[in-house]
Image: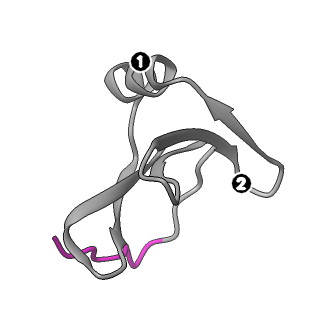
Amino acid sequence: MRYIPSPIPIQVNLVYRAEANKSGRMQYHKIQPGRSKLRISRAEFIRAFNNSNIVALNPLPVKNNEVDFQIEFYV
């Protein structure tokens, strides 16, 4: 999956990120750009994904792994 960045800068209030840690377990974060990064539950991440007005999605590739990817979405 290729990520093509937007040529237009976007203003976002929150960034939600799902990423695997070194042991392979998923961790979910809510990030206020330039302010804080807060770990959240899987349920909160899913609720935000289903109910938020998403501006953009960014699939984050995992090094040396073509199948798995992590995701970030902007609100």
- Span of residues in magenta: 1-8
* Amino acid at circle 1: Arg
Mark 2 residue element: loop
* Amino acid at circle 2: Pro
Residue at 55% x, 23% y: name it: 41
Q: CA distance from mark 1 to mark 2?
A: 20 Å
Q: Is residue 7 left or right of residue 35?
A: left
Residue found farthest to the right: 35
Magenta span contains residue 6:
yes
Residue identified by numbered label 1: 47
Residue at 27% x, 73% y: name it: 3
Classed neighbour count for the residue bearing mark 2: other residues with Cα under 10 Å, few (<14), some (14–19), many (≥20): few
Magenta span contains residue 37:
no
Residue identified by numbered label 2: 33
The x, y position of residue 53, in whole percent, is 40, 31
Q: How is the image coloured?
A: one colour
Mark 1 residue element: helix
The x, y position of residue 50, in whole percent, is 32, 22
